[in-house]
Image (cartoon, grey):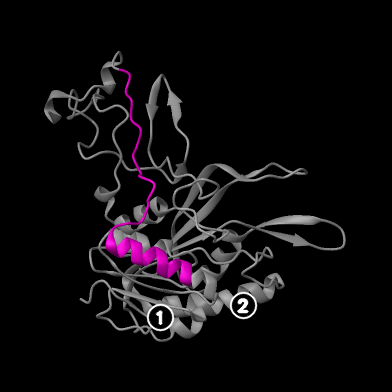
């Protein structure tokens, strides 16, 4: 596999292929059943500088075509992670919030995809509003096309909150009830610690959105964090698998793939953002990219017995 070079034209031998191109045109160049994982955050149709706002019907029609191409290039055991926020619908009478993940769910369902998780990514700072509550989360919808799919839970397990907990009945009475490898994280990913019975724990947390002085911040207005994508990549793909992003923006999906030893491909029709992505990818390839470390903050209360590591695990 070719290393250290960024290619514009796709070849299965490329480690990195990034194109300043329309996503449909680029996706059509990828071979059928060649992509293990698709991670993307499409434009939300909210009049950002990189998009032209259209009717919700036209918006969904375009993305329906994109999903068709994603379905064609996806491996049988592959996954699609589609991150969305809300769309504001305006008419002569009012403004209404339209949850885009639900609109997209209908598209994916029509194409026979299966929704595996609706992951809520919560963050502490976001859109402020004066006439409704402030937006503080987005949704990652995880889809597969078949019932047999790659799912590497051990790669993303988190520390047990109560490792010393034991079964109190049945044939396992007295035995440690948890998994020594850690617990299955929830589908609610929060960027703030939760305090429970004086135990400060962290599951899928410490992933703030990329704003202000975040070390990963670029000039892209809607950039998501590397840690968020890395967890999806670890969970749903293997080393050297191909990871694709049809709306690559600042290059976060590609960067996460490179850091985790995957092949990556993606495109953006905005030349400015394409250049930002290339810059970030070059830094990822040479190891100089600044990345906010994803370190769970686990502080057990030593006065509670069930928070102590059992002797069987030592």
Crowd band around label 1 with a 10 angstrom C-alpha radius: few (<14), some (14–19), many (20+): some
Q: Disc 2 on helix, strand or loop?
A: helix
Crowd band around label 2 with a 10 angstrom C-alpha radius: few (<14), some (14–19), many (20+): few
Q: Which residues are magenta?
A: 275-301
Residue 308 seen: yes
Would you place residue 108 above or below residue 95 in this image? below
Residue, x 53% and y 71% (percent of image)?
272
Would you place residue 135 above or below residue 257 in this image? above
- Confirm whether the magenta stretch covers residue 52: no
- Quarter of the view holding residue 233: bottom left
Left/right of residue 270 with respect to residue 58 in the rendered view: left
Between 110 and 216, the residue placed more toward the observer is: 216
Residue, x 59% and y 78% (percent of image)?
62
Residue, x 38% and y 79% (percent of image)?
73
Task: Pick the quarter of the image with the N terminus.
Answer: bottom left
Q: Position of residue 146 (x, y in %)?
A: 36, 69
- Confirm whether the magenta stretch covers residue 278: yes
Query: Residue placed farthest to the right in the image?
Result: 92
Query: Residue placed farthest to the top in the image?
Result: 303
Q: Position of residue 100 (x, y in %)?
A: 61, 60
Residue annotated with mark 2: 61
Residue annotated with mark 1: 72
Between 142 and 52, the residue placed more toward the observer is: 52
Task: Pick the quarter of the image with the C terminus.
Answer: top left
Q: Disc 1 on helix, strand or loop?
A: helix
């Amino acid at each position: 596999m070719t290393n250290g070079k960024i290619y514009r034209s796709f070849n299965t031998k490329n480690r990195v292929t990034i194109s300043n191109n329309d996503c449909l045109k680029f996706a059509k160049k990828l071979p059928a059943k060649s992509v293990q994982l698709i991670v993307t955050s499409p434009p939300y149709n909210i009049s950002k500088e990189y998009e032209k706002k259209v009717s919700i019907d036209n918006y969904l029609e375009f993305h329906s075509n994109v999903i068709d191409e994603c379905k064609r290039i996806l491996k049988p055991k592959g996954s699609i992670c589609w991150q969305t926020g809300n769309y504001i619908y305006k008419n002569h009478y009012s403004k209404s919030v339209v949850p885009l993940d639900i609109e997209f769910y209908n598209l994916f369902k029509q194409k026979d995809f299966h929704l595996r998780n609706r992951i809520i990514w919560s963050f502490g700072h976001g859109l402020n509003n004066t006439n409704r509550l402030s937006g503080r989360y987005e949704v990652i919808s995880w889809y597969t096309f078949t019932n047999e799919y790659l799912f590497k839970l051990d790669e993303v397990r988190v520390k047990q909150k109560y490792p010393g907990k034991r079964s109190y009945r049945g044939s396992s009475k007295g035995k440690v009830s948890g998994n020594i490898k850690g617990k299955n994280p929830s589908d609610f990913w929060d960027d703030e610690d939760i305090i429970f019975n004086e135990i400060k724990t962290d599951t899928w947390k410490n992933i703030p959105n990329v704003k202000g002085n975040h070390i990963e911040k670029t000039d892209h207005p809607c950039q998501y964090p590397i840690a968020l994508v890395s967890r999806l990549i670890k969970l749903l793909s293997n080393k050297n698998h191909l990871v694709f992003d049809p709306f690559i923006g600042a290059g976060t999906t590609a960067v996460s793939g490179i850091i985790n030893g995957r092949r990556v491909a993606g495109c953006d029709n905005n030349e400015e953002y394409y250049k930002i992505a290339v810059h970030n990818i070059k830094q990822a390839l040479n190891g100089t990219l600044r990345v906010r470390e994803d370190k769970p903050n686990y502080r057990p209360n030593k006065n509670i017995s069930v928070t102590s590591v059992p002797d069987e695990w030592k």
